[in-house]
Image (spheres, rainbow, N blue to C red):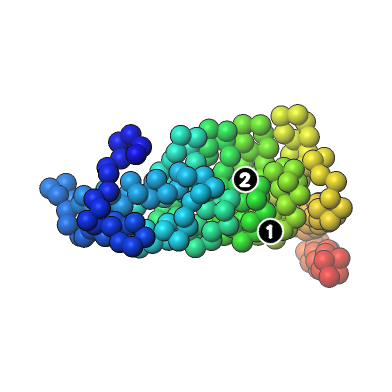
Amino acid sequence: MREGHEEADPKRLDSKGLSSADPKRVNSKGMSSAWKKKQYELTDLVCRGQNIDWTAVLFYTNYGGLDPNHVDKVQMTTLHHAAFAGQPLVLQWCIQAKGDVDARTVLGRTPLHYACDADQAECVRMLLGHKADVNLANLSCATPLHVACANDSLQAAAALFQEAVSCEVDVNAEDSRRQTPEMLTKNKELLKLISDYRDGADFRRKCSMMAWAAMAFASDAQLGLCFGAWAKEACDSKAA
């Protein structure tokens, strides 16, 4: 039994070994012993590394007050574990329970790093859909895209490019060894994905500059409208 954890009462365990004490019974501080027991049991479950019983973890998500931000000895939260294991239901519960989508381990890795490490595209989409920072680097200055490339996580990388709408994925970011993401992979599909995204990003920036120039420098109002319309038409045709 871990230090500081209560020993489960065998009279209050169900067939799965889960505590079934009444969660509504509270003490003077508004916290029930059952709630505390659930918290300890959930913490034990998510600290088991690759041996996590995710069915049991889902059982605990039915209890209010459980903390998705509880950390283990390396500062991994339930979000980190769920993202790596590809458990979108648990991940969704964590987010709804105000879990930190950008929580960082002792090495500075976020849940998005872990989802990219294990090529868990659905978890990548869910994290980005809740505004996880797509370019947040770890202590080695590696972004989630670095991790995806280092592990040939094609589906996760594709999800990064598809779902990162609030800001662009920095495909030119350098890690502590001055390596960009594409320098970490020889996967041709992944390299093409990065190249296509870079070309698209460059073109979008050019279109934005053209539209700005139309408004800023066209002295004639009608000429400005025509130039702006031409720039939009050019961008639309290129995108198509």
Relative depth, front residue between 150 and 98: 150
Residue 169 at x, y percent in the picture: 70, 49
- For the question of whether residue 65 can be seen, the reply is no
Quadrant for the C terminus, please: bottom right
Density class for disc 1 (Cα within 10 Å; few <14, some 14-19, many ≥20) is: many
The residue located at (50%, 35%) in the rendering is: 74
Task: Name which residue type carries label 2.
Answer: His
Percent position (x, y) of residue 179?
Answer: 78, 34
Which x, y percent locates residue 91?
A: 50, 57
CA distance for labels 1 and 2: 13 Å
Residue that appears at 58% across and 50% down: 84
61 or 232, which is in the foreground?
61
State left or right for residue 120 relative to residue 102.
right
- Pointer 2 local density, CA inside 10 Å: few below 14, some 14–19, many at least 20: many
What secondary structure is found at the residue carrying circle 2?
helix
Residue at 43%, 40% (x, y): give it.
Answer: 71
For residue 214, what is the image quadrant? bottom right
Residue 91 image label: none
Q: Which residue is denoted by mark 2 in the rendering? A: 113
Q: Mark 1 points at which residue?
A: 159
Q: Earlier in the sequence, mark 1 or mark 2?
A: 2
Circle 1: residue type: Ala
Where residue 48 appears, as percent x and y from the top left, is: 47, 45
Whether residue 118 is visible: yes
Which residue corresponds to the image point at 75% horizontal and 29% vertical from the top-left? 177
Q: Check disc 1 and report its element: helix, strand or loop.
A: helix
